[in-house]
Image (cartoon, helix red, strand yellow):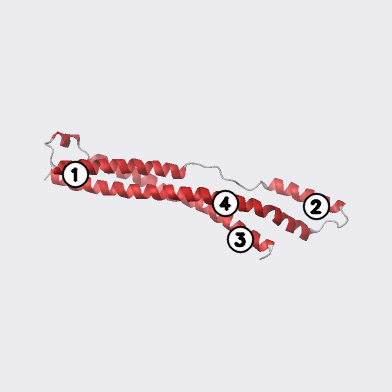
Amino acid sequence: MNEREFYGVCYDRYRHEQNQTDAIYQRAGILLVSLPILGAVAYKLGEPELLAQTFTWKLFFYMLGAGSAFTCLAASVVFLFLGILPRSYESLPPMKVWKDWRDDFRRRLSESKSGPDEERIGNEFITQIIPKIVDAEHDYCKKNERRRRHFRSSILWAAGALGGIGIEAFFHMLLHS
């Protein structure tokens, strides 16, 4: 694999990680909509007057379902925000920096015996940019993996909340029958 092919691979990985960041934000929107809906359902099922009833096993499981639903919803919200909090990513230097570098390199070559050589300038550019791309991609990859873990945790806690709401709803029905 020559330098140009390696540059292509590195740049493709860099772009892939940038796209993964965008995808995480898009998926987070689904949870941002569904968590308030789950919270509203759990809240609507909660009836404080039921707590005035004589304590029974039905009431215990109803309270257990409600408590677990709200606890899971709170944990899901925390993990969701941890997943979507803005982070600073290492990025490539702006194109102006690369243009100035290229102009300076071309000037130095012109002043040397060999003279300017576009092939050599291109190869040197690739040699200079590859480490920057590799470092930036590595930074994206680490931060995206952390975000994905938080997002997965948020989904699992939301699923737990759904289970708690199911228990709450079932025992709500039994208490009113």
Q: Which residue is mark 4?
A: 138
Per the image, label 4 sits on a secondary structure element best described as helix
Is residue 119 visible in the rendered structure shown here? yes
Q: Point out the frontmost of discs 2 and 3.
A: 3
The relative height of residue 1 versus residue 100 in the rendered view (above or below) is: below
Q: Earlier in the sequence, mark 4 or mark 3?
A: 3
Indicate the amino acid at tag 1.
Phe
Q: Which residue is mark 1?
A: 61
Q: Point out the frontmost of discs 4 and 3.
A: 4
Indicate the amino acid at tag 3.
Val
**Inter-mark Cα distance, 1 to 2:** 77 Å
In percent of width and height, residue 153 lies at 39, 48
- The residue that appears at 59% across and 58% down in the rendered structure is 12
Residues at circles 1 and 2 in contact by the CB criterion of under 8 Å:
no
Side of 150 where 45 appears, left or right: left
The relative height of residue 55 versus residue 109 in the rendered view (above or below) is: above
**Inter-mark Cα distance, 3 to 1:** 56 Å
Indicate the amino acid at tag 4.
His
Q: Which residue is mark 3?
A: 9
In percent of width and height, residue 118 lies at 78, 58
